[in-house]
DNA sequence: ATGGTGAGTGAGTGAATACTCACTTGCACT
DNA sequence: AGTGCAAGTGAGTATTCACTCACTCACCAT
């Protein structure tokens, strides 16, 4: 409780590291296909200790998804702050750009896709719903944009996920260009 | 080859039944989480025989995804035929409605979500890309709509998937209504 | 010094499951 | 009658993986 550890990092620090490792590891192959061992290795820790801090794989995955949404919110806020005038569309546009940069490394994007796929697990579905709620209410309030604009923002974010998972952005064909046209400017969630 | 079986259904008929069973079974829990046994049981067949007709689980899954895209194309075409005048937007609208009805049973929708999640497997990613290509080029040619309209069609289809997987359409809260507003009229893919 | 406590792990266990194979059955043709 | 062949299966095997547990070690308060 009141010990101040020096040599050993305490449990909270470890939890942080594990969640971060989980985010990347689960993003790689998804909830079912990623063994907890992969997370442990990435965190430089024994698998047994991962289970001590996160009693089930499910809880570990959920923590990673939660972290993902937190990171999105932070990114959107930072993007919003770059806009000086309060124009709703300008802020939305900036947020879209910020999100596009955030998902450039794929982890943030893929873990959402995997969470959506694993949403038959009630707790995971609830986490997704909670994350979506956070983003939507935040974007609506912070930008003051119309309902239609916010909905469109989310929809094109989903399109962005599809484009990335199917790799069509580096494809050159006509139909692919049609789908990916201008996506850098609208993505979210 | 030239045998005409009566009592025993031949392999092709079985393949059909298995693909149909796979579509539903995989839609339930996804690629990784669905054992091939679940497909076999649903098809009323032994697991060993499923493996005889589909040498790997991956091939079985891909066959199911392919079937899903075929069904979507058929549905879109049927919807298009209900429109008498050739107005692009009217056809798109009808297609959206047709798709919305199609995914009412969730299987067609969920298997796409699961396939997207499993798209780190190259063959699955390729199948998704192929399906998307089919839909996009078909919709573009059949409706003659603008690139923007087609892109929007796909984007709102993806939004539709998000709404369904998170169950927010039966949620009543303000943010949820914002996201789900009018979705019955725009979904695709 | 010593006993208590939190950090951390090695070595399991049991269940699930992708895939195999030797086998049976029943039809078609001779 | 009997042979060949496609349809179909029961009973495995080998592996992977979520989760457990008995343990060690370093530090601290007394």
Image: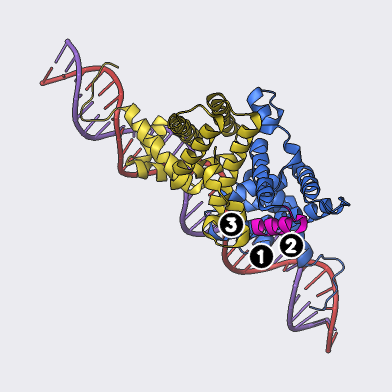
Chain colours: A blue, B yellow, C purple, D red
Residue A16 versus residue A37 in the image, above or below: below
Above or below for B18 versus A114: above
A54 or A162: nearer the eye?
A162
Mark 1 surroundings within 10 Å by alpha-carbon count, few (fewer than 14), some (14 through 19), many (20 or more): few
Residue B136, compared with residue D26, is above or below; it is: above
- Which residue sits furthest front? B85
Q: Nearer the viewer, mark 3 or mark 2?
A: 3
Q: State which region is magenta.
A: A131-145
Q: Where residue A15 is drawn, which disc sits there?
A: 2
Residue at 64% x, 62% y is A51
D26 vs C8, left or right, is: right
Please report contact status of discs 3 and 1: CB closer than 8 Å, yes or no: no
Q: Main secondary structure of the magenta part?
A: helix
Secondary structure beneath disc 2? helix
C-alpha separation, residue under disc 1 versus residue under disc 2: 10 Å
Helix, strand or loop at mark 1: helix
Quarter of the image for residue B41 reads top left
Point out the tag, 1 or 2, that comes first from the N-terminus: 2
**Chain letter behind tag 2:** A
Q: Position of residue D7 (x, y in %)?
A: 29, 30
Q: Classify residue B74 as left or right of residue B6.
A: right
Q: Which mark is residue B177?
A: 3
Dot 3: chain letter:
B
Residue A100 painted magenta: no
Q: Position of residue B52 (x, y in %)?
A: 39, 31
Q: Which class describes the residues within 10 Å of circle 3: few (<14), some (14-19), or many (20+)?
A: some
Residue A11 appears in view: yes
Residue A57 % position (x, y): 61, 57
Say yes or no: labels 3 and 2 on the same chain: no
């Amino acid at each position: 409780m009141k010990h101040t550890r020096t040599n050993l990092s305490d449990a909270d620090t470890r939890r942080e590291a594990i969640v971060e490792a989980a985010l990347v590891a689960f993003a790689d192959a998804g909830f079912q296909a990623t063994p907890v061992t992969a997370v442990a290795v990435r965190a430089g820790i024994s698998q047994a200790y991962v289970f001590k801090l996160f009693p089930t794989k499910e809880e570990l995955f959920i923590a990673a998804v939660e972290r993902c949404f937190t990171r999105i919110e932070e990114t959107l806020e930072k993007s919003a702050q770059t806009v000086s005038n309060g124009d709703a569309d300008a802020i939305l546009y900036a947020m879209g750009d910020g999100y596009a940069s955030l998902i450039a490394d794929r982890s943030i994007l893929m873990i959402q896709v995997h969470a959506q796929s694993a949403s038959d697990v009630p707790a995971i579905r609830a986490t997704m719903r909670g994350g979506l709620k956070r983003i939507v209410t935040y974007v609506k309030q912070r930008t003051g944009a119309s309902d239609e604009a916010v909905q469109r923002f989310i929809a094109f974010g989903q399109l962005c996920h599809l484009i990335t998972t199917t790799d069509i952005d580096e494809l050159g064909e006509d139909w692919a260009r049609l789908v990916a046209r201008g996506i850098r400017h609208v993505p979210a969630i």
